[in-house]
Image: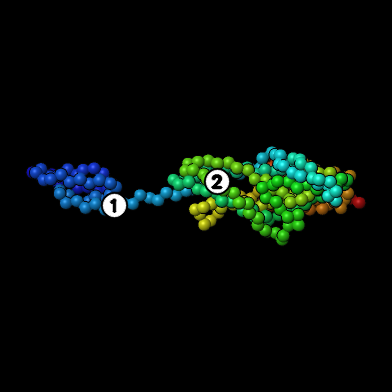
Amino acid sequence: MAIPVSLLGLCGGDKQPSPGQPRQEISGNCNAQGSGNSVTCQNIAAPPNRSDLKVVNVAVQKPSKVDAELQDEGRRNPPEKAQIEASVIDVTVKNSGTAPVVILGVDFTFAFAEEMQNCPGGGDGVMVGAAYSVKVPTSPPPRPFKLTRDIRFSVASGGVERFTLSVGPDQQYDANEGGPWLYVMGLALRTDDAPKTVDLGTVAIAAQPRMLIPKPYAGFDPDCLRQNLEVMAAAARFPAIRPEELTSAIKAYAAYTMPRR
């Protein structure tokens, strides 16, 4: 008596024949259907490998050193090599897909770019040019505007990668004379396999955090102080990831009341 056999689903190997019938072999990934000695097999294509890049974390580190050149304003002397403190954006990503992905660059969309004033005054006329990842024009275009930093590295399937970015003006006075630039910018990654960018969120920084005066003082020039209060209040309106020193300064400036004349 023949025993009917029905197959449905993925299979690989042999289908047992009825007694007295020749053995039938079915191999590979297929959708096998039928009964007895009649079997049809339709090949099923394996799903394509795809990358899946996700953001794990975006933060602003404690100030880090970046290479810089110090140049007197009249350029009477050769530039001097130095290092300055910069706010550094720390990014961690993970590729949860089955294929590697190549990060091609980062797009920075600036919603805010304003320079605070050095209210204590003074100065020695020294200009600073630092090796920031992205250099913002000292006279920035109307906001919003976009700058791009090209980078290239691969994130393997299941891999986690971390990298840092610094942002600052192409030229500025040193801390004895200048004030910090405040930037609020949206960041997005460009990759080799996606028409759309990977959003990293919005970040706010003081480009040279050592220049940031943590709170206003009544002895400062009133016009200078008033201008800095306006700049800080405008930067605070943007929801953003901020370093601790900038968050603290925003609160201190917001709580300050200008003395009456």
Query: Is disc 1 surrounded by few (<14), some (14 to 19) or many (20+) residues within 10 Å?
Result: few
Query: Residue 9: image x %, image y %?
Result: 27, 48
Frontmost residue, 103 versus 230: 103
Seen at 86% across and 53% down, the residue is: 223
Q: Quadrant of the N terminus?
A: top left
In this view, the residue in front, 247 or 261, is: 247
The relative height of residue 241 versus residue 195 in the rendered view (above or below) is above
- Element marked by disc 2: strand
In the drawing, does residue 51 fall left or right of residue 147? left
**Residue occupying image coordinates x 91% and y 51%:** 261
Amino acid type at image mark 2: Phe
Callout 2: few (<14), some (14-19), or many (20+) C-alpha neighbours within 10 Å? few
Mark drawn on residue 153: 2
Quadrant assignment, res 80:
top right
Instruction: Specify the quadrant of the image occupied by residue 161.
Output: top right
- Circle 2 or circle 1, nearest the eye: 2
> In this orientation, which residue lies closer to the viewer: 218 or 87?
87
Q: Residue at x 21, y 53 (%)?
A: 40
Residue 106 at what x, y percent from top left?
Answer: 60, 51
State the mark number for residue 43. Answer: 1
Q: In the rendering, at what x and y percent does residue 6 appear?
A: 19, 47
User: What amino acid type is highlighted by mark number 1?
Assistant: Asn
2 or 1: tag closer to the N-terminus: 1
Distance between the Cα atoms at labels 2 and 1?
37 Å
